[in-house]
Amino acid sequence: MNVTVNRKAHFNAAHRLYRKDWSDDKNNAVFGKCNNPNFHGHNYELIVSVTGPIDQETGYVIDMKVLRDIIKTEVEDVLDHKNLNIEVPEFKELNPTAENIAVVIYNKMRPNLAAHLDLKITLFETPRNFVVYSGN
Ligand SMILES: Nc1nc2c(c(=O)[nH]1)N=C([C@H](O)[C@H](O)COP(=O)(O)OP(=O)(O)OP(=O)(O)O)CN2
Ligand SMILES: [Zn+2]
């Protein structure tokens, strides 16, 4: 019997969507206002979902306090109030789209969880735009 434990978090970050190897015209055509050279920001809302069996002794799938601390260390401390393009090494050569941010968060969280637990990342970039990544 598997149960999913969910923990919400949030962070604020600035970014610019563009490719260095494209012309200004092409970046503007593809990314529009998201290609603003002076960057723009989002209030990202994150849901981290961990699925697995209930431990018969503790009644936990995972201790939510442990999950909270992993999110703080691996996500909030790294991304909150940062310029993703400039300050976060993973995005030096990777466009910080919602899709890529979700994959980066997954890859940072995954090693901190026991192998028998499944991980799903749901990331809201705006109240209406969100992505989901489960590692495949
Ligand atoms: N597939 C993706 N498409 C877009 C991404 C992305 O990460 N993945 N990102 C952006 C922009 O960064 C931003 O998210 C767009 O903001 P905006 O158009 O203002 O979105 P809103 O939901 O706030 O606005 P609406 O008025 O509801 O459209 C663009 N595309
Ligand atoms: Zn944006």
Image (cartoon, helix red, strand yellow):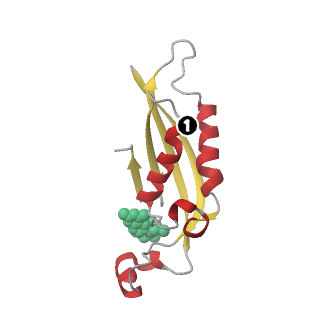
**x, y percentage for residue 56?**
51, 13
Q: Please identify the quarter of the rendering in which residue 95 is found.
A: bottom left
- Residue plotted at (59% across, 27% down): 63
Q: Ligand 1 is located in which of the four quadrants?
A: bottom left
Q: Is residue 26 left or right of residue 8?
A: left
Residue situated in front as seen by the camera: 91 or 12: 91
From the top left corner, tell me how far across and down residue 97 is, in percent. 44, 63
The residue lying furthest to the top in this view is: 57
Left or right: 39 as drawn, with respect to 100: right
Q: Is residue 60 above or below residue 14?
A: above
Q: Nearer the viewer, residue 43 or 52?
A: 52
In the rendered picture of this protein, how many numbered marks are placed on residues?
A: 1
In this figure, which residue is indicated by the disc labeled 1? 112
For the point 58% across and 63% down, which residue is it? 13
Q: Would you say residue 118 is visible in this rendering?
A: yes
Q: 10 Å neighbourhood of mark 1: few (<14), some, or many (≥20)?
A: few
| Residue displayed at 58% across by 35% down | 67
x, y percentage for residue 80?
63, 57
Q: Nearer the viewer, residue 131 or 16?
A: 16
Quarter holding the N terminus is top left
Q: Please name the amino acid that badge 1 sits on.
A: Asn
Relative to 121, say whether 43 is above or below. Answer: below
Q: Residue at x 46, y 53 (%)?
A: 102
For label 1, the SS is: helix
**Whole-percent x, y for residue 99 in the image:** 41, 57
Indicate the quadrant where residue 42 lies. Answer: bottom right
